[in-house]
Each structure stands twice: as C-alpha cells, then as structure tokens.
Image (spheres, helix red, strand yellow):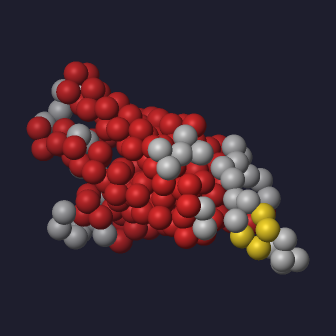
Amino acid sequence: MIQDSQNKTIAITFPIAAYQPKDLAWTLAFIFTAIAFPALLAHTPQNQWITGTIVNAIIFLAVWRVGIVNATFVAALPSSIALVRGLLPAPMAILVPYIIVSNLVLILIFYSFKKHRLTGVIAASAAKFAFLFVITTLFIPISHPLIGMLQWPQLATALAGGLITASIIKIFTGNRQSFSS
C-alpha cells in the first residue's frame, strides 16, 4: 500500500498493461536500464552473474510495475541489443529468440503467481531455466562453453533477480504477504 497525493491509501497491483504516461516512462526506463547495465558491464570478469541478476530483476520489476505487455518489451530488447552491439558471442545469435522466449515464460509465470510472489519467483526462475536447459541440451548444437552460459547460471541469476525484486516490492507495498507461498 502507498499513499497518493491526497493521502488516500492505494494498493499496488500487477497490471496486465499500463498505458498512462508515467507507466510508459517506467517502461522506457526499464528498457534503458536493461540495455545499459549489460553494455556497461560487458568487459568485467564473470559479468553474466552480475548482468544476468540485474536484467532478471528489471524484468521482474517491470512485470510488477507496468504489466506483462510492457514487460515483454523489456524482456525482448536486452538480448537483441547485446547481439547487435557485439556483446554476445556470434554463435549465440541462434539462441537469442530462445532467450527472449525464456524471458516471456518468466514474465507469464511470475504474473500468474502475483498473489504469491516468492512462489512466483521460484516457479518463473525454474521454468526459464528448464526451457533453456531443454533447448540447449536437446535442440541447439553449439559449443560447450556457450551452452553452459544458458543453463545453471540462468537459474541462479533469475532467482537472485527475483529475490531482489520481491524485497523491493515488499519495501514499497509494506505487504507482509509478499513472501507467502
């Protein structure tokens, strides 16, 4: 719950889509942040752990703040921009559509558990990981180091980003049920 300008208590819920100017501004801010952090941190050692956590947190936050429709834009652009800017290895080009779909899976599952955010984080993270694990082990024949980037690190970074988001939601809503399962 938060207070509006007339001191009325309003609930922050999970919208499906948000089209108010402030929501579009939030969407653009999430997109910019999801693109900027990976670009800024591209040359740091082990950057996947940092950038993956940040991008997943941004995607989870976008679902909560601006809805699944707007969050879809946030989820689709980082991988696409990273590939175009040369931040991803060229052999990963074939995987970008699957990365985007895995982010959409994360969005839809987290949204479907909106009343049980922690359960949503865990389920969405596990589903994203499972999707990418199946794709990279059964369907995409690429080199081993690249496959490793899309397996266990995806689960860890999605969980970390989701837990950060759940904490932020709890702070902003003051809702003790934020971590219920």
Q: Is residue 166 left or right of residue 3?
A: left
Q: Quadrant of residue 69?
A: top right
Residue farthest toward the left in the current orientation of the protein: 144
Please tell me which residue lies in front, 110 or 178.
178
Q: Is residue 160 left or right of residue 150?
A: right
Q: Quadrant of residue 136?
A: top left
Residue 27 in picture, x, y percent from top left: 63, 59
Residue farthest toward the top in the current orientation of the protein: 138
The answer to whether residue 132 shows anywhere in this view is yes
Q: Is residue 161 left or right of residue 32?
A: left
- Residue at 55% of width from left, 70% of height from top? 171
The answer to whether residue 28 shows anywhere in this view is no
Residue 134 in picture, x, y percent from top left: 27, 26
Q: Is residue 22 left or right of residue 76?
A: right
Q: Is 48 placed above or below 14 here?
A: below
Please tell me which residue lies in front, 79 or 153.
153
